[in-house]
């Protein structure tokens, strides 16, 4: 499930790299309507579904992995927690959440992320977050962070699992 996946470039890349996988692109109706034509091409159309909706209301159920790439940095903590809780309600206990975002480093390290954080704050009243801030956000959204994977890009891959509802 690519939640808030825009035109589907990430999902297209995943489906092409993993030919046995299937995926759902989920975003607002006007965004899904302009999805990458490759997702409806003969080689991907049988493995890809386009679903319109709002991640503030509900997301598709039944996925093994829910991916959100550069979504949470657009929102304050309260709104981000609401988005995470919506995802959590749709997920089974065995599902995994993958969040792709910048992770702000410690003081006096990794200044690029801090400049992005300032930009997000000034322009959108949103933010980049530290490892601890992501951990807190995920906990409040119903998840336990299991790892952060650094990439060669400015974004990191944050992996989380649903907390037990028992």
Image (spheres, rainbow, N blue to C red):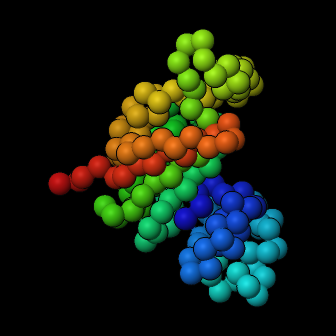
Q: Furthest residue to the top? A: 108
Nearest the eye: 19 or 125: 19
Please give the name of the residue rendered at 55% of the width and 13% of the height, measured from the top-left corner: 107
Which residue is rendered at x = 66% and y = 71% of the image? 17
Give the residue at x 73% y 85%.
43
User: Is 55 rendered above or below residue 151?
Assistant: below
Residue 97 point in image, percent of width and height: 46, 54
Can you say which quadrant of the picture contains the N terminus? Answer: bottom right
Figure quadrant of residue 16: bottom right
Specify whether residue 44 is in view: yes
Residue drawn 36% across and 37% down? Answer: 140
Pick the residue in front: 97 or 18.
Answer: 18
Q: Quadrant of residue 27?
A: bottom right
In the picture, which quadrant includes the C terminus?
Answer: bottom left
User: In which quadrant of the rendered view does residue 144 lie?
Assistant: top left
Say if 70 sits above or below 117 in the image.
below
Horizontal relation, residue 63 to residue 163: left or right:
right
């Amino acid at each position: 499930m690519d939640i808030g996946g825009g035109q589907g470039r990430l999902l297209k890349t995943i489906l092409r790299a993993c030919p046995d996988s299937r995926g759902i692109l989920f975003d607002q109706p006007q965004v899904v309507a302009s999805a990458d034509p490759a997702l409806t091409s003969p080689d991907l159309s049988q493995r890809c579904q386009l679903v319109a909706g709002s991640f503030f209301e509900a997301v598709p159920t039944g996925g093994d992995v829910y991916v959100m790439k550069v979504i949470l940095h657009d929102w304050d903590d309260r709104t981000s927690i609401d988005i995470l809780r919506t995802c959590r309600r749709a997920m089974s206990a065995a599902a995994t959440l993958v969040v792709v975002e910048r992770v702000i480093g410690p003081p006096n390290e990794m200044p690029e992320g801090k400049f992005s954080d300032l930009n997000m704050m000034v322009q959108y009243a949103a933010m980049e977050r530290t490892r601890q801030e992501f951990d807190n956000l995920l906990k409040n959204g119903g998840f336990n962070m299991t790892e952060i994977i650094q990439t060669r890009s400015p974004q990191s891959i944050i992996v989380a699992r649903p907390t037990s509802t028992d």
